[in-house]
Amino acid sequence: MLITTLPIASEEQVRLVVEYYCVRWGIEIYFRTLKSGCRIEERQFEFLKRELNALAVYMLVAWRVLLLCRMGRACPDLDCEVLFEPSEWQAVYVIVKKCDPPILAPRLNEMIRMIASLGGYVPRSKTEPGTQTLWIGLQRMHDFANCYESFGPPSRLPKATCVVR
C-alpha cells in the first residue's frame, strides 16, 4: 500500500506514482553510500566552502559506485575497459585470480564481482554485489592499480641508474 497526495484517478497516474516510489530506493542507496561509504558526515572543515567542495567530490564518488553496481547488472557482457583503466582491471585480476591477466579484458560483471570480492563480497551465482562491498573493493583496487603501474609487469618507470658522487 502506498500513501500519496499525488492524483491517482487514472491507471497512468497510478503507474507514475509507483515509478516515483521505485526511484526512491535508489536515492536511499545513494545517500547511504554518501554517508557510510564516503563518511561525509564525519568530515569537519573550518569553512563551509571546503565542506561544499568535499561534498561535490564525494557526490561523484557515490554516483560512480552506484553506476558500477547498475552497469554490472544491466550490461554484464560489456568490456570492463569501458569503465576501468587497464592497470586497474589487470591489478585486480592478478590479485584475485592469482595468475597473469588475460590479453582481452574480462566482462564488466566479472570485473565488478572481483572488485567487490576485495571488499568482502562472497561470489554466488544468485546474488549481485552491493554498494558497500564495492566501495571497499574500489578503495583497495586503487591502491593495487598504483602498485601495478609502478612495479607490475608493464612497469612504465625508466630504468634507474645510481650515480655516486
Image: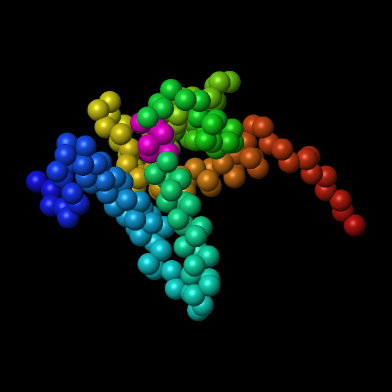
Q: In the rendered structure, which segment of residues is drawn in magenta?
A: 68-73
Q: Main secondary structure of the magenta part?
A: helix
Q: Report x, y in % for residue 113.
A: 38, 33
Q: Is residue 10 left or right of residue 70?
A: left
Q: Which residue is most to the bottom? A: 46
The picture places residue 158, in percent across and down from the top left corner, at 78, 40
Residue 156 is one of the magenta-drawn residues:
no
In this view, 51 is above or below 4: below
Q: Is residue 63 left or right of residue 154?
A: left
Q: Is residue 137 visible?
A: no
Nearest the camera: 6 or 61? Answer: 6
Q: Nearer the viewer, residue 157 or 110?
A: 110
- Residue 36, position in %: x, y? 34, 58
User: Is the image coloured rainbow, by chain, by secondary structure, or in one colour?
Assistant: rainbow
Q: Quadrant of residue 19?
A: top left
Q: Is residue 37 above or below residue 125?
A: below
* 24 left or right of 59 in image: left
Residue that extends furthest to the front in the rendered view of this protein: 9
Q: Position of residue 91 (x, y in %)?
A: 54, 35
Give the residue displayed 42% in from the left and 51% down from the top: 62
Residue at 18% across, 49% down: 7
Quarter holding the C terminus?
bottom right
The reply to whether residue 78 is visible in this rendering is yes
Residue at 45% x, 55% y is 59
Identify the residue at image location x=44%, y=73%: 44
Q: Quadrant of residue 109?
A: top left
